[in-house]
Image: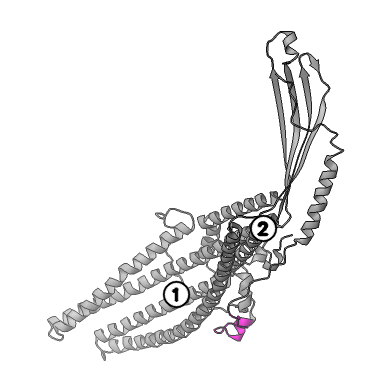
Amino acid sequence: MKPFIPPAVHRDPHSGARPICLAAATTALAILSACAAPPIQPPAASVPLAAAFAQAGPAAAAVQVSDGAWWAGYDDPTLTTLVEQSLIANQDVAIALQRVAQARAGSDAQGSRLWPTVGVQASASRSDSGLPSPVKQGMPDTRALRAGVDVAWEIDLAGGVRAARDAAQAEAAAAAAGVEGARLLVASEVARQYFLLRGAEQRLRIVQDLAAAQRETAVRVGSRLREGEASAFDLDRARAEADALDAQLPPLRMLAGISQTRLAVLLGRSPSARVVGDNAGFAWPAAREIGTGQPSELLRRRPDLIAAEARVAAETLRGAEARAQWWPKLFLSALLGRQDLRLNALDLAPVHFSNVALAFAAPVFNAGRIDAGIRAQSARAEEALLVWQKAVLVAVQEVEDSLLVRAQEAERAAALASTVDHRRRSLQRAHSLQREGQIDLLVLLDVQRSVLSSELALSDSRLQQVLADVQLYKALGGGFAPARAGTAMTSLAERTPQ
């Protein structure tokens, strides 16, 4: 057996490794300066955005968009409590937070590629042949103790690793915006389901009163039929109207029950638990002015647009990473350590060893694989841009639609409120006339039903007004502006490989 010789060049670690490392660093810096990535330009909308929303009045455009807890402005403690609890316990928000944790871990992993990898290795070996001493001169017994530090580094010449790092950071920013988007969706959906519940309860009470009045009318018609003052046709019509009103009760009860279960899920509770109690004295909140700002402000307000823009940056940066595959790669590796060796009974002096290598690799022929990857990534970047452009148009559309619904429902509610007022006055006169015997009780009951029907329509209109308000706050990104979110959401132009 031949003596054990470690696979390393025995030299002073300060004599050869330092010049090689210095030369590698100098070469890398020179090439890096020539391969600096160009700045990423912010995306442009597919169509120019107007200076103001078409459906917004001058007052609404002048009022600053609220970034506070807009749900607290309804002065409804129950609603405020529900929204605040949902923002803490909702599972969609929790899922979004975990996505942020994943994205940030991925960003850290990509960033670590820019730094050298350092490891420690150690080994111990012993060989005892058991042969006589004369024979051991040719096949000595050995004992080797070896320890060293291993360093490996891929020098990022073309900026591909930096582009991958910055792309991961952009994805982390998109995930952070997704958290605010989830909170906005949860808050708006809780408010929407709460008002649907209150609207269903209010309309249920009105329909029940209206059905009771119609059944009383049917009883009166039956009495008049027995006295020969009404026909069977009148009785059938009165009963049919009462049955039709009874048929409206199950859908309203169903709507109220579904709103309860959806609220329970939004709050992270069991759908079998009732989360909101009845409120017979509920009154619809008064209309208020909501600032809209300019359409261009949506690009920095809405979390979904911020996330979509960050994804455009990420895909653009991955395009730079794909193009960097055509550039040469430079790898630096070094092994520095100390070894203690014994041959038979002879202890050799401990020695230092080093092994430094600089490797260079450049693509020459790969059958178009790199070009195909560049084309595929370019298509993904273009897709991300189109998604962002569509999201901008949809965002403006949602604001315009909400403003239109608010304006038209305000006119409808005003007309219905006037109708209810007039019919209530007519009901008071009908009571007076009926007491004086100038009109029949059936006429009084008809007037009473008309009042209840108008109140039902007015309740529905006010519900639609409030729902339009909630939708407008959601469309404007209100309540969760990036400035108060506490997350790093840099603009697209700032996300440039450094």
Image side of residue 133 versus residue 228, left or right: right
Q: What stretch is highlighted in magenta?
A: 47-61
Asked which quadrant contains residue 370, the reply is bottom right
- Quadrant in which the N terminus appears: top right
Q: Percent from the top left, x then y, of residue 406?
A: 50, 80
- Quadrant in which the C terminus appears: bottom right
Image side of residue 268 versus residue 27, left or right: left
Image side of residue 308 versus residue 348, left or right: left
**Dominant SS in magenta:** loop
| Image height of 147 relative to 487, above or below | above
Q: Nearer the viewer, residue 323 or 99?
A: 323
Disc tally is 2
| Image height of 269 relative to 352, above or below | below
Q: Residue 463 carries which label?
A: 1
Q: Percent from the top left, x then y, of residue 368?
A: 59, 59
- What sort of colour scheme is used for the picture? one colour
Q: Mark 2 points at which residue?
A: 326
> Residue at the spot x=41%, y=59% of the render?
261
Q: What residue type is labelled 1?
A: Leu
Q: Percent from the top left, x then y, of residue 195?
A: 46, 69
Lower position in the chain sequence, tag 2 or tag 1: 2
Q: Residues within 10 Å of mark 2 (few under 14, many from 20)?
A: some
Where disc 2 sits, the SS reads helix
Where disc 1 sits, the SS reads helix
Asked which quadrant contains residue 14, the reply is top right
Q: Does the magenta stretch include residue 284?
A: no
From mark 2 to mark 1, how far is it between C-alphas? 61 Å
Q: Nearer the viewer, residue 37 or 142?
A: 142
> Residue at the spot x=78%, y=13% of the render?
345
